[in-house]
Image: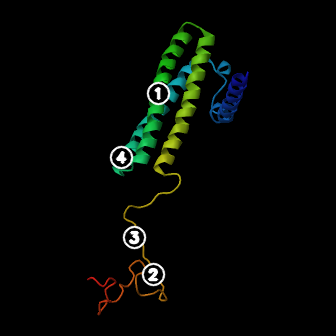
Amino acid sequence: MQFSRLFLAAALISGLAFAADAPKTSEAVVDASKVPDPEKLQRSANALGKMRDTLKDVIGKLEEARNSKDVVKLNCVNEKLSQIKGLLRISELADVSLQEAVANKDTPTAEHEFTKLSIAEAKVLQLRSQAEECIGQLAFRTDENLLVDVEEPSDLPKTDPTRPVAPPNVESRPPPASPTL
């Protein structure tokens, strides 16, 4: 009984998390039943072109991260790149299925494949912006040859506080602690 409640709570929480993320993707998705078949094919071809261009851009970001020798950026961009490649592969298969469905006048299958393509396109564009965030282009961009001038205040102590002054040398030896020496 306790396990089923725990499972139900976990399912509810994951469902809410998925629902919170859904508007980002579904805003760009068009109702497939309202799009005529020839336009579905045209939009599909355009979406694949955009996704391939995005793939090229993210590969450029990967090279940029590799050249900066920053492992964190490299891993972040590589993760987004892998996801984009998977979505592109799914989209290419969906495009082939869409063309077959349109040729066979199979409207439900055509709508399904078109919806898959629309969702994949929106997700790829989202992954592109995340890859740019990995590199830091949206947050800030710095020049590698940046020079900074530092002015020291005149009232600072002249000695380095991390290097204390050595204690003075002892001139005379103290008497022995034991009379046997």
Neighbour tally class for label 1: few under 14, some 14-19, many 20 plus, Cα within 10 Å: some
Mark nearest the camera among 3 and 2 is 2
Q: Which residue is mark 2?
A: 151
Q: Residue at x 45, y 82 (%)?
A: 152
Please state which of residues 56 and 10 is positioned toward the viewer in this rendering.
10
Determine the CA span between mark 1 and mark 2. Answer: 52 Å
Amino acid type at mark 3: Leu
**Where does the image place residue 21, in percent across and percent down from the top left?**
65, 35
Determine the CA span between mark 1 and mark 4. Answer: 22 Å
**Where does the image place residue 8, in percent across and percent down from the top left?**
71, 25
Q: Residue at x 40, y 39 (%)?
A: 59
- Secondary structure beneath label 1: helix
Q: Which residue is mark 3?
A: 147
Which part of the image, by quadrant, shows the C terminus?
bottom left
Amino acid type at mark 4: Arg
Residue at the extreme bottom of the image, as rendered: 171
Q: In the rendered image of this protein, does residue 114 appear above or below residue 72?
A: above
Q: Residue at x 47, y 57 (%)?
A: 141
- Secondary structure beneath label 2: loop
Determine the CA span between mark 3 and mark 1. Answer: 42 Å
Image disc number at residue 66: 4
Q: In the rendered image of this protein, does residue 67 appear above or below residue 16?
A: below
The earlier-in-sequence mark between 1 and 2 is: 1
